Image: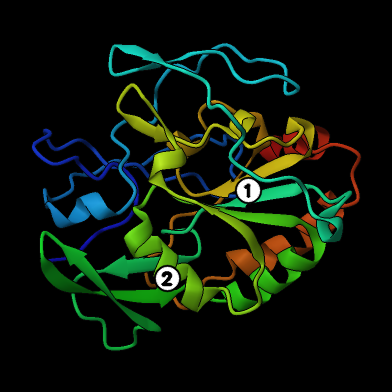
Amino acid sequence: MQWDGPGCIPLQNAPVPPSCQSPALRSSQCNVSLKKQRNRSILSSFFCCFRDYNVEAPPSSSPSVLPPLVEENGGLQKPPAKYLLPEVTVLDYGKKCVVIDLDETLVHSSFKPISNADFIVPVEIDGTIHQVYVLKRPHVDEFLQRMGQLFECVLFTASLAKYADPVADLLDRWGVFRARLFRESCVFHRGNYVKDLSRLGRELSKVIIVDNSPASYIFHPENAVPVQSWFDDMTDTELLDLIPFFEGLSREDDVYSMLQRLCNR
């Protein structure tokens, strides 16, 4: 049984929704999606669950205060008692914060055996151990090392920690990620696991999110660097091509002007 990426994986006992694919970096529109049907699977619930990224974002708020209440399953979700990230360390003082997605952005994972898998991670589901086969995106090592030099890096995935944490242990050999955030740190908003950047505890004008799914940054699209969903194309160079862009972005006073130029290209 194969997991086919983070976009629009159905929740258990939920109807099968269309899947989402993020737009290319240089697309003139940053929120274009391609849709196709996914297979239902209880195993799929381990990975990112998005059902429809075309949802209405809540009103924006000042980055200096906790975010307002957010609708969740017909009710209200209270703001967290504290921010998701700890205080900035001396090592990262003055650096911008880059939030990086995992599945289909840095790696592709599957329950189906892959002969050239970089990692094989055992994951327990309902008392049974399943092997997850993980492929690293080309140039992910160079990308992560350079990002760790330039930014305060945070891994933020809508996947479950019992899968994503051991993958991150194997992927991040240099300790690039200062923090790791998983599904429980997302906001479940109108059927989507959304990464609410206002809950990080960082000034939003100095926060960037790198993600293949527009659903994940629907609250803050102006902070996003969209990337193509990656599965198994070993000729892919997107992460390598992004390095010069981020080198320039690290020198900007705030992220918005440069990201706006990116989306208008």
Amino acid type of disc 2?
A: Val
Q: Residue at x 17, y 72 (%)?
A: 130
10 Å crowding of disc 2: few (<14), some (14-19), many (20+): many
As drawn, which residue projects farthest toward the front?
81
Instruction: Name the element at disc 1.
Output: loop
- Relative to residue 209, is residue 31 depicted above or below? above
Quarter of the figure with residue 134: bottom left
Q: Residue at x 32, y 38 (%)?
A: 50
Quarter of the figure with residue 151: bottom right
Nearer-the-camera pick, 200 or 100: 200
User: Is residue 66 at least partly visible in the picture?
Assistant: yes
Q: Residue at x 57, y 11 (%)?
A: 59
Q: Is residue 105 left or right of residue 260?
A: left
Q: Is residue 27 left or right of residue 203?
A: left
Q: Position of residue 181 (x, y in %)?
A: 50, 49
Nearer-the-camera pick, 111 or 131: 131
Q: Is residue 93 left or right of residue 49?
A: right
Quarter of the figure with residue 18: top left
Provide the residue designation for mark 1: 26
Which dot marks residue 194?
none
Q: Quadrant of the N terminus?
A: bottom left
Q: Are marks 1 and 2 in contact (CB under 8 Å)?
A: no
Amino acid type of disc 1?
A: Arg
**What count of labels does the image hold?**
2
Provide the residue designation for mark 2: 167
Distance, label 1 to label 2, CA atoms, is 29 Å
Nearer-the-camera pick, 141 or 173: 173
Q: Position of residue 262 (x, y in %)?
A: 72, 42
Q: Residue at x 82, y 33 (%)?
A: 257
Labels 1 and 2: the sequence-earlier one: 1
User: Is residue 235 at least partly visible in the picture?
Assistant: no
